[in-house]
Amino acid sequence: MTIQDLRTLLDYHYWARDRMLAALMPLTPEEFAKELGSSFTSVQDTLGHVYSAEWAWHQRWNGVSPTSQLPRETFPNVATVRDLWAKTESDVRRFLEGLGETGIERTFEYKTLAGDLGSSVFWHMLQHVVNHGSYHRGQLTTMLRQLGHQAPESMDLIRFYRTRK
């Protein structure tokens, strides 16, 4: 894995995130918070979880191990999440660039939310952030359909690569 590979994965991750956020913008406050019986009960909780997890990883890379996800009230609507995530995106990209080519091999020690000790190579963690986002974007797509809304534009990785030609 190279730093350029990780830049490309981040480009994909945020490209797909933006497509998802655009599809979520038309939701009413009631639809955003409606319990739908997924692994996270609502769009609000699922979106909050994905953002919170990325935020937590970034915190760990900076030597802080959060003990819980961000509270639900942090995510009152899609626009707020979009604004929070824009800052986190900038922070994550800046952190990656600060590590440089050799730094992506660095092992970080941290505590999980449950307080267990963890130790992972940076590029493994960043791949996890991207993969985790993809998993939950699939859930959000299903939730949009359950609510009678259009699914987002394709978020497939191959579609992303095709758009970069």
Image (cartoon, grey):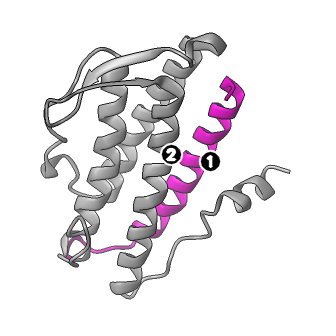
* N-term-proximal mark, 1 vs 2: 1
Q: Is residue 103 left or right of residue 40?
A: right
Q: Nearer the viewer, residue 138 or 118?
A: 118
Which label number is shown at residue 48? none
**What x and y, as percent, mark residue 63?**
29, 14
Q: Is residue 133 left or right of residue 27?
A: right
Q: Quadrant of residue 97?
A: top right
Dominant SS type (magenta): helix
- Tell which of 140 and 19 is nearer to you: 140
Seen in the picture, residue 77 relative to 125 is either above or below; the reply is: below
Nearer the observer: mark 1 or 2; the answer is 2
Amino acid under label 2? Val
Element type where label 1 sits in the image:
helix
Residue at the image position 38 percent from the left and 88 percent from the top: 148
16 sits left or right of 111 in the view: right
Give neighbour class at mark 1: few <14, some 14-19, many 20+ (Cα, 10 Å): many
Write the residue at 55% across / 47% down.
13
Q: Is residue 149 left or right of residue 164?
A: left
Against 77, residue 152 (above or below) is below
Expressed as whole percent of the image width and height from the top left, the position of residue 70 reads: 18, 41
Residue at 62% across / 47% down in the picture?
A: 12
Badge 1 vs badge 2, beta-carbon distance below 8 Å: yes
Observer-nearest of 25 and 69: 69
Q: Quadrant of residue 91?
A: top left
Label number found at residue 12: 1
Magenta residue span = 1-30
In the rendered structure, does residue 143 fall within the stretch colored magenta? no
Secondary structure beneath dot 2 equals helix
Q: Which residue is mark 2?
A: 130
At label 1, the amino acid type is: Tyr
